[in-house]
Amino acid sequence: MSLTILRLLESWHGQLGILAVAALVHPAILLRRGKVLSRGAKLAIVLATMLVVVAFGSGVFIYDDYRELVKRDLFKASPTAGLLFETKEHLGYGAMALAVGAAVCALAAPRKAIELRRLSAIAFAGSAALTLAVGVLGNWIAAVWSFPS
Amino acid sequence: MTTTVVHRESTRSSALALAGLAFALAAPSSYLLQRIFERLRGGTFDPSLIVQEPTATFYWRFGIASWSGGVVAIAAFAYAHRTTFTDRARRLWTIALISLPLFWAFLTWRFP
C-alpha cells in the first residue's frame, strides 16, 4: 500500500475514533433511565456500535504497516509515546468489546427489563470514556511520529 | 399458551441481553490476562532498544479475547435461562461494569 493511502487511512482512523466518542455518549444517555427503546433509539445504538467497530477495524487494517514502518521509529523518537501507543491499542479493544456487549444487551433486553438497559448504559458510558482516552492518545502519538512522507 | 410463549421469549431475550454483558466483561478480561502473561514472560525491557516485531501479537491477542468472550457469553446465556435476575446480581453487574473500564485504563497506562 502506498504511503499516501496509509496516511489517509490513519487520518480516517483518527477521525472515526473522535466521531465514535460522540456517538457512544448518545446511547449512554438514551439508556440511562432504562426506558423502552424507540426505533430511532435502536438505530442510534446500532450506528454508534458500528462506528466504534469500524474505527477499531480501520486501526487493525493499517496495524501491520504501522508495525513495520512507524512503531520502531516512534519508540526511538519517544519511548513514552511508544508505550502510550501500546496503551492505546489495549484501550481500543476494551472500548470496542464493551460497546458490542452493551449493544447486544440493549437491543435484546425485553420491554420490562429496565435494569438491563441501565446496565447497558453504564457499559456504553465506559466504552465512550475509553474511546475518548484512545482519541486523545492517538492524536498525541500521531503528532510525535507517523507514516513517513 | 400465549402467556407461556411470551414468557419464554422474554426469558430468552433476557438471557441474550445478559450474554451481551458477559461478553463485554469477559473479552477485555481475557485480553488483559494474555497481556499480563506476555509481560510476565518478557520481563522488564528498555523501550529505546525495541526492534521490529516479527509477528503482530495484537491480532492474536484480540482474536483469542473475542473468542473466549464469545464462549463466556454462550455459557452466560445458558445459565441465565435457568435463573432470575436478582437485585444482588444487578448490583454485582453494576460494580463490574463500572470498575472494568477504570481498572482497564489504569493497568494499560501503568503496564503498557
Image: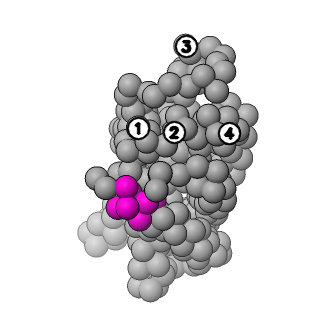
User: In the image, are marks 2 and 1 on the same chain?
Assistant: yes
Instruction: Indicate the secondary structure of the residue bearing disc 2.
Output: helix
Q: Residue furthest front?
A: A149
The disc, 4 or 1, on the residue closer to the chain's N-terminal end is: 1
Label 2 CA crowd tier, 10 Å (few <14, some 14–19, many 20+)? many
Marks 2 & 1, CB-CB < 8 Å contact: yes
Rendered location of residue A52, percent (x, y) = 47, 63
Measured Cα–Cα span from mark 2 to mark 3: 21 Å
The subunit letter for the residue under badge 4 reads A
| Local SS, label 4 | loop
Q: Which sits earlier in the primary sequence, circle 2 or circle 4? A: 2
User: Would you say residue A118 is visible in this rendering?
Assistant: yes
Do discs 2 and 4 share a chain? Answer: yes
Q: Name the residue under label 2.
A: A71
Secondary structure under the numbered disc 1 in the rendered image = helix
Mark 2: which amino acid?
A: Lys
Q: Real-space Cα distance between discs 4 and 1?
A: 17 Å
The numbered disc on residue A78 is: 4
Which chain does tag 1 point to? Answer: A
Amino acid type, label 4:
Ser
Q: Can residue B62 be seen in this view?
A: no
**Residue depicted at 34% across the width and 69% down the height:** B6
Residues in magenta, as a range = A3-10
Q: In this view, does A60 lie above or below B72?
A: below
Q: How crowded is mark 3: few (under 14 residues within 10 Å), some or many (20 or more)?
A: few
Q: What element carries label 3?
A: helix
State the CA–CA distance, disc 2 to disc 4.
11 Å
Q: Mark 1 to mark 3: distance in Å? A: 23 Å
**Residue B105 sits above or below residue B48 on the image:** below
Marks 3 and 4 share the same chain: no
Q: List the residue tagged with mark 3.
A: B41
- Amino acid type of disc 1? Glu
